[in-house]
Image (cartoon, grey):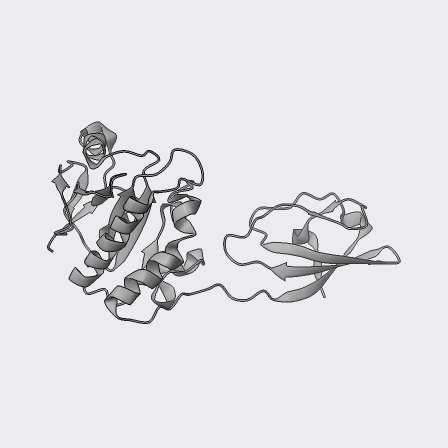
Amino acid sequence: MANSSLVSYTKLSPNHSGKRNHAIDTITIHCVVGQCSVETLGSIFAPESRQASCNYGIGYDGRIGMYVEEKNRSWCTSSASNDHRAVTIEVASDMTSPYAVNDKAFAALIDLVTDICKRNKIKKLVWSTNKSDRVNHKNGCNLTVHRDYANKSCPGDYLYERHDEIVAEVNKRLGVKTTTSTPEPFKPYLVKVTASALNIRRGAGTNYNVAGVIRNKGVYTIVAEKAGQGSKKGWGKLKSGAGWISLDFCEKR
């Protein structure tokens, strides 16, 4: 596996697992949480005690550094299986949410991702807002994010919300039509609960949004929609003001 010719600074980190056990078919973009240089990134990943690394890093000035050669698996995404198949890229960013990156760094990111795709014969870049698509590489998805594997916001909302833009521009340069995988459309249905079901705490894993409530003789009919991956989870307050309700305990009509 060759490395990118776009690299202007190299400081190889000892923090890697040696040769990959999977061909490169994925790219994972991270935010650094700091507007740092490629030299600073190299210093961050240099100590063995750090127990972290990435294949490439992009500084605030748009320069590109390499810290783990592409032939080796970096320690970047809290997932061995992901890092064995993904080229990992850290991008200099602001230190606070949404962890924005500047124009120079973003332009360099597009250049680097395009170069990685061309050299590794990734013919088309595919992004999905559905976590299941990403982690299982379904529907051709070959972009993953750190938040898929750990309780982190990485790559930050700034870059996360621009993955469609990244894909469109990279695929334009690759000469292919962009295809973005999306979650299944919302599927409305009705559920019924009685007043006695009120004030029950919503359990983990519920994935429904309250769209409306109809009250008739003490029976509340809740119009709910199945939400796509990444939708906010929380409580649904009855419009009648009667209290809070858990859809976990609703009876499906």
The percent coordinates of residue 78 (x first, y second) are 32, 43
Q: Residue at x 18, y 43 (%)?
A: 17
| Nearer to the camera, 76 or 192 | 76
- How many numbered marks, from 0 up? 0
Does residue 36 lie above or below 212 as drawn?
Answer: above
- Residue 14 shows in this picture: yes
> In the shown orientation, is residue 139 left or right of residue 227?
left
| Nearer to the camera, 236 or 176 | 176
The percent coordinates of residue 151 (x first, y second) are 43, 40
Q: Residue at x 64, y 55 (%)?
A: 209
The percent coordinates of residue 234 (x first, y second) are 62, 45
> In the shown orientation, is residue 225 left or right of residue 78?
right
Quadrant in the picture for residue 101: top left
Q: Residue at x 43, y 52 (%)?
A: 161
Quadrant in the picture for residue 24: bottom left
Q: Quadrant of the C terminus?
A: bottom right
- Residue 85 shows in this picture: no
